[in-house]
Image: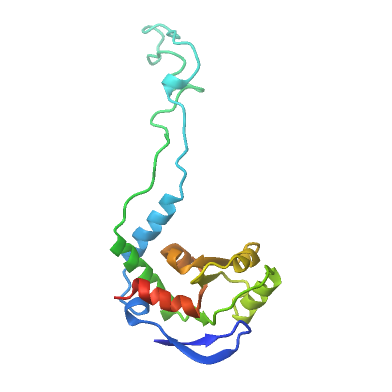
Amino acid sequence: MKLAVYKTSGEETGRTVELRDDVFAISPNDHAIYLDVKQFMANKRQGTHKSKERNEIRGSSKKIKKQKGTGGARAGNIKSPLFRGGGRVFGPVPRDYSFKLNKKVKILARKSALTYKAQGSQIVVVEDFIMDEPKTRTMVEIQQNLKSENKKLLLVLNQPNKNIYLSSRNLQGIKVIMVSDLNTYDILNASSVAFLESSIEALNGNFGQ
């Protein structure tokens, strides 16, 4: 598959880049996508939730009423989970939600996500550019020139560029990411994915067979 390379002004450069079929035109695996996104979301969870059990509640341990003859159920102390202010039964405790996922499954999931984007014509290639200073207005103009205003745009870089990152940091609809940090969640969450020309070559090298 070949795509035209665009300038930041939205005009075509006259050049094209080759998208490898083993990266952008595979048979998508939905279950691999599900597992990769699930792991991504699970790894972001802090897992610091906590509720107090009956042994952690302040209160008297005295038996609040006699065992028999009251006509009601037996009751121990006031810290019982049956009473208001008592401990909670099987409440949440701090835990780690992360889990292991094989590297090949992750690669398959990302290839599948890129394939869906390619099938939906949601991939655009932009010639490499640099910014001498952070300027949010420039990033807004680039987003408009790529016809991605009011949409989620994922800009994929090959090399770190602090000025590009700072220029887009204040924009809700743009996310800048390195090609080495590309993940399934960000690909699917974006309305369109804009690759810099050099990042396509790096991506083909990372995911290609």
For the C terminus, the image quarter is bottom left
Applied colour scheme: rainbow
Q: Residue at x 45, y 21 (%)?
A: 56
Q: Nearer the viewer, residue 55 or 111?
A: 111
Left or right of 27 on screen, residue 63 = right
Whether residue 56 is visible here, answered yes or no, is yes
Left or right of 157 on screen, residue 102 = left
Q: Is residue 192 above or below residue 4?
A: above
Q: Nearer the viewer, residue 61 or 140?
A: 140
For the N terminus, the image quarter is bottom left
Q: Is residue 47 above or below residue 150?
A: above
**Quarter of the image where one finds residue 204:** bottom left
Left or right of 63 on screen, residue 139 = right
Q: Residue at x 37, y 8 (%)?
A: 67
Q: Residue at x 46, y 75 (%)?
A: 199
Residue 173 spot, x, y in % from top left: 60, 67
Q: Is residue 145 above or below residue 105?
A: below
Q: Is residue 146 above or below residue 76?
A: below
Residue 86 spot, x, y in % from top left: 47, 22
